[in-house]
Amino acid sequence: MNSTAKGNSLEDALCDYLINQQERGNLVYDLYPPERCIIRKKPKYDCPERRRPVEFDVVIELYREGREAPHSYVVFECKNYKSGIPESRVTDFSDKMGRIFGHSVKGILVVSSRLQSGAENIARSRSMGIVKFNETGVDVVADRRRPYAVESAFVKSQIFDEKHRVKSLKFSAYFDGKFFSDIGQLLECFEQGAEDKSSGGSEGVSVPYISTDDIRALATEILEGIGYKAGHVDLAEVCAAMSLELKFSRKNIFDEDGTLILGSANFDRNSIEINSHDNEFRERFTIGHEIGHFCLRHGHYLRSETVIERDLLVDVEGAENFNFTRLELQANLFASEIILPDQVFRLAVEVGRKRLEMRDIGFGYIYVDDKPWNYQPYNELLFDLSQYFRVSKQATEIRLKKLGIVNDQRRYGDTSSANLIGEIFANIQTGDR
């Protein structure tokens, strides 16, 4: 795809996003009703100095009540580059706006990838905003009540290069030292003189904590609703019972960092779409993860959600975690509970122990070390359980350890759950389930 086509693609995606926000009625909150905003793509404005029209990528014209002419303009310049934007491009864009609109304009540079932090100085000196737009990212619910705060550090990691990469947002913005997670907040800051309207974590509330017991109870209720008795859970049946549309795509879709997007959830449409997988067990866990987002009412915070491999590695609650991390943790806990139902799983473990003659001789309900007579039956138990529930051996082992019924004394020590989940994907290449 040439540079012009790439730029047009970004413009089209951004324009569709803005129109969608306007149709929802929450583009600029209390400042201007959506019907007083006109979104234009590739508009041309007369330029007396150049004696010919000048074209811009995307423009929002804002109107006051009773006025026929726009009160102000928000102009977007889309640059679909992989690397940072040259200072000359920023300067040219700023000069072009000044010739047409004077002081009644706010300029926003839209990029599809992260920028070098030096871009911050350019944006500040020219009083311009920076927006990173990712069509495949997570879409946060934009609501003037601010029910959910997206931390500034999280949004900052979307726009500027940082060592710690996080899940991509659909819309991220920077202006005057502040960070924003939706277009309404950014325009509100523009209009009200850059007062403190950012999503810096001081407004809104955090995602509430949900205990494992509560998540287990919810999963159990759903399983009872579909009449589940034993064996692997029919996740398609779970989706049907919840009126969720489950779709499968054979496409490989990647995020901006080149990471495979395993699936997505759309909370407005009540739909889950699973992308191409090369492993049935990972696909089932991905479906369970997305079902978890719906069951746990994460649509209160998000309009759409994507799941990548990193999301399935989240299994520890930490004070340093972002709100998004807590959402992913909760979805993973639910996936484990729905795919490996508590009572049936415990019963299957007991049946397996008896068949393999694994006894508690004072070292624990299930004991494993490097001795073949301990390791081999343990490994066979994992294999039998994984086949019975159609889930990976690693996920099965995580479940056993979460229940506290394994005393693992192998030389490598007690592997963390995150590392064990990581083995799920490492073993895909070898076919080891």
Image (cartoon, rainbow, N blue to C red):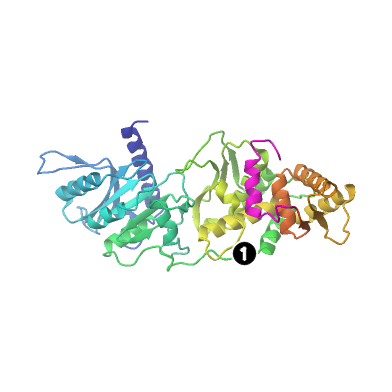
Looking at the rendered structure, the secondary structure element under dot 1 is loop
Q: Residue 389 placed where, x, y %?
A: 75, 45
Can residue 189 be seen here? The reply is: yes
Please provide the residue range marked out in magenta: 411-433
Residue at 56 percent across and 38 percent down: it is 275
Residue 430 sits inside the magenta stretch: yes
398 inside magenta stretch: no
**How many labels sit on residues?**
1
Q: Residue at x 34, y 54 (%)?
A: 34
Relative placement, left or right, of 236 versus 157 is: right
The residue identified by callout 1 is: 210
Q: Quadrant of residue 384?
A: top right
Q: Is residue 10 left or right of residue 388?
A: left
Which of 374 and 315 lies nearest the eye of the viewer?
374
Bin the neighbour count of mark 1 within 10 Å (Cα to Cα): few under 14, some 14-19, many 20 and up. few
Type of residue at label 1? Ile
User: Residue 401: image x %, image y %?
Assistant: 73, 57
Which residue of the protein is positioned furthest toward the bottom in this rendering? 202
Looking at the image, which residue is at 77% across and 43% down? 383
Q: Quadrant of residue 181?
A: bottom left
Give residue 97's position: percent from left, percent from top. 19, 48
Q: Is residue 143 visible?
A: no
* Residue lying farthest to the top in this orientation: 1
Q: Say above or below: 195 vs 283.
A: below
Which of the image's four quarters has the C terminus?
A: top right
Q: Which corner quadrant holds the N terminus? A: top left
Looking at the picture, tell me which residue is in the foreground, 211 or 160: 160
- Left or right side of 137 for 296: right
Image location of residue 166, percent across then percent down: 48, 52
Residue drawn 74% across the image and 59% down it: 403
Is 186 placed left or right of 233 in the picture?
Answer: left
